[in-house]
Amino acid sequence: MSASRASQLLAAFTVLTLAITSTPTAAKAARALACGTPGLVVAAPYDTVDGQTRAGTVTLFRGDQKQAVLSQGAGGVTDAPERGDSFGSAVAAGDFNRDGCADLAIGASEEFAGTPVPDGADGNGLVHLMYGTAHGLTPAGTLTVTRLGRSRDTDRFGAALAAGDLDGDGDDELVVGIPGLSEGGGVGIFGLKGRKPSGKGTLITQATSWVAQDHSETDQFGAAVAVGDFDGDGKAELAVGAPGDTVGTTSGGGSVTIADPRARQAGVYTQNSPGVPGEAEKWDSLGATLAAGDFDRDGRDDLAVGVPGEGLDTFQDGPMYGNGGVHVLYGTGRGLTAIGGEFWSRETKGIGRKSLNTDRLGSALAAGDLNGDGDAELAIGVPGGNMVLVLAGTRRGGLTARHHTIVKGRKGHPGDLYGSSVAITGSGLAVGSPGAGRVTLIPSRTKKGSYTGLRLTGARALAGPSNSLFGFAVAP
């Protein structure tokens, strides 16, 4: 793992991806995750395993009860834990083989094949597949960039993962982000058109003929991925973030591409696109995070796009800083549109709070129905401010600042980096504090209307190994 990548993880100020791993007590893990049983997965990508630093582990919980601690090299998962693997750099759950059980895809983006490479280089990357059954999680093979017809390089294959039914055949496809691919990054799709998810995949890059975008080596296309049915036709589309993308002559302005691999069509949004508020500025990093959900309950998914480097004052100072913001694009019968979209920050009317250039609002995003009224809420991580902003969805107008909730971390502990990861589960909100090695669980209740449904007084904390970045990522 490169020194720059290590500092990014430790600062928790960069693209944050959902994370998990798997192994030792596979039976317990299966009961927690297989066949749709609710659970919580917490990644600790810097945990030491068998003496190997930063090999990574993941802990599985049911409620606040630990079910299993997972790592490479155990429970049927191939590969031995090695220094810097970051096993659990990303995770996606979906039904990849259409048997009704939840399956898992687990990224180890800093894994190297063959001879170990000294610190200073990004990894080749690897993704483990685990099928869920009524009796446990079953290893189902591994994926590398070679399944896309490419040779291994410092690709960081598996740095981002998503799942969804892109071809309408009833099972989920697996989407793998490859932000280090040589032509500025890429995305692999596995399981299209009846293919096995462990078989040959489809590669999409900015240079793909029907995408046809300019690209450079530092675009990081695939650093974030999300799947949603943005036009309501019952088949999902793909959103791909490229936070390093150059917009015009603006380095690191960032972009998000909406791709339909069935129709072989794609469009791109930047902060210079018509209808998108603001303008692209250096190191904005639009597309660093993505979350899809139906915020207005019209039967079409909408898309939240993080811009953690967005500057709202005159003191912007390099790529690790930013007040931060979130753009929301709403779904229509023709797909996503910027018309009627929104831009959210701490300074948005109705929220009215002072914003700092170290907030990095939008570094983490999660969408889901917290209050049980059928539309999705949006949780926005503000790790530099040690907080999470939660907006309620409504049937008319989508997200609203009315009755928004600010969830704060421990007072006097800015190093906790509270809000570096967020997840909406079946029972509430999970917030990661990797600097402290903690995850806070905040229950929610049914409360229809413009309410988040969160019950802050019921919050409880989970603790993990010290110096492991426990809570770097959380996933339901």
Image: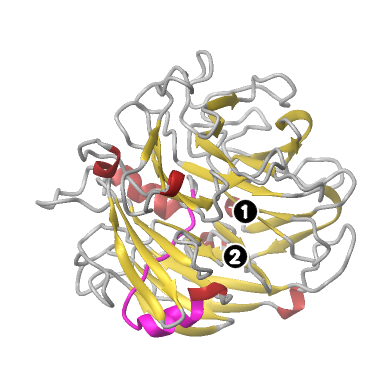
**Residue under the image location 59 percent in, 81 percent down:** 63
Answer above or below: position of 323 versus 474. Answer: above
Q: Which residue is mark 2?
A: 431
Q: Is residue 21 magenta?
A: yes
**Residue under the image location 31 percent in, 80 percent down:** 24
Can residue 290 be seen here? The reply is no
Q: Which residue is mark 1?
A: 381
Pointer 1 and pointer 2: residues touching (CB < 8 Å)? yes
Can residue 439 be seen here? The reply is yes
Using the numbered discs, state the Cα–Cα distance from disc 1 to disc 2 in whole angstroms: 8 Å
Disc 2 marks a residue whose amino acid type is Val
- Residue 131 point in image, percent of width and height: 40, 68
- Residue 260 point in image, percent of width and height: 55, 33
Answer above or below: position of 330 versus 137. Answer: above
Q: Nearer the viewer, residue 20 or 55?
A: 20
Magenta region, residue range: 16-33
